[in-house]
Image: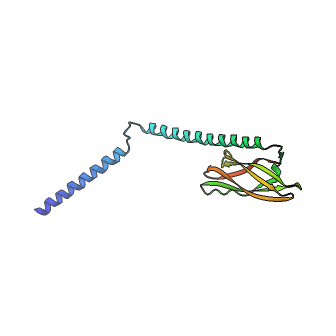
Amino acid sequence: MANVRRGARGVRAVGAALCAAALTVAAAGCSDDGDSPSGAASKAASAASSAASKASDVVASATAEAQKKFDDFKDGVDAKGDVKLGDVDNDGKRATVPVTVGNSTTDTKSYIVEVDFKNGDGKLVDTVVLNVNDVPGDATKDATARSTHSLDGDVTADVSRALRH
């Protein structure tokens, strides 16, 4: 008789555990703030929109900063054709791209270069400005453009503009 009682207790314990598990699963589908699934989807869409807005603000800020640096670079001559970029390395942190500046004059010159980083859709996701100083005449000098923040996915880079003085 003792074995029958232990068996009944075991069945009741398993039954209680199953009920508790079922209640937990059912509760997990609900939120404690009364949101419906469509409300949760709306919140997710709002968060995505907010993230996109912040990314847009970052790009606008970087573009404004680039313009300021170019405004401060006096007596510059268009030198975009003197700048070559290598392949973008995007390790999931900050994207980098090798920059080579070729000085086609006989005098030592300094350069300011704006590099635009774009996502796989061709959308501008970051812009950086670098100074490459004291490039000897008839020579090249290497530098690296580094994104200002983490960039996801496929990223390309191109020279937006460059000046020499």
Q: How many labels does the image show?
A: 0
Residue that protrudes farthest toward the right in the picture: 106
The scheme the figure's colours follow is rainbow
Direction from residue 18 to residue 55 in the image, left or right: right
Position of 130 compared to 57: left or right?
right
User: What percent of the width, then of the height, locates residue 159?
Assistant: 75, 49
Q: Is residue 65 left or right of residue 22?
A: right
Return the residue nearer the eye: 84 or 10.
84
Q: Which of 19 and 156 is in front in this view?
A: 156
Q: In which quarter of the image is residue 34?
A: top left
Identify the residue at image location x=71%, y=43%. Answer: 66
Residue 77, given in percent of the width and then of the height, sits at 84, 46
Q: Position of residue 89 (x, y in %)?
A: 66, 57
Q: Residue at x 66, y 40 (%)?
A: 60
Q: In this view, does 78 lie to the left or right of 148?
A: right
Residue at image x 76%, y 53%?
A: 132
Q: Which one is nearer the viewer's eye here, 95 or 153? A: 95
Q: Going 28% across and 52% down the picture, which residue do you hit?
A: 18
| Closer to the camera in the image, 93 or 8 | 93
Pick the quarter of the image with the N terminus: bottom left
Q: Hey, which residue is sitting farthest bottom in the picture? A: 3
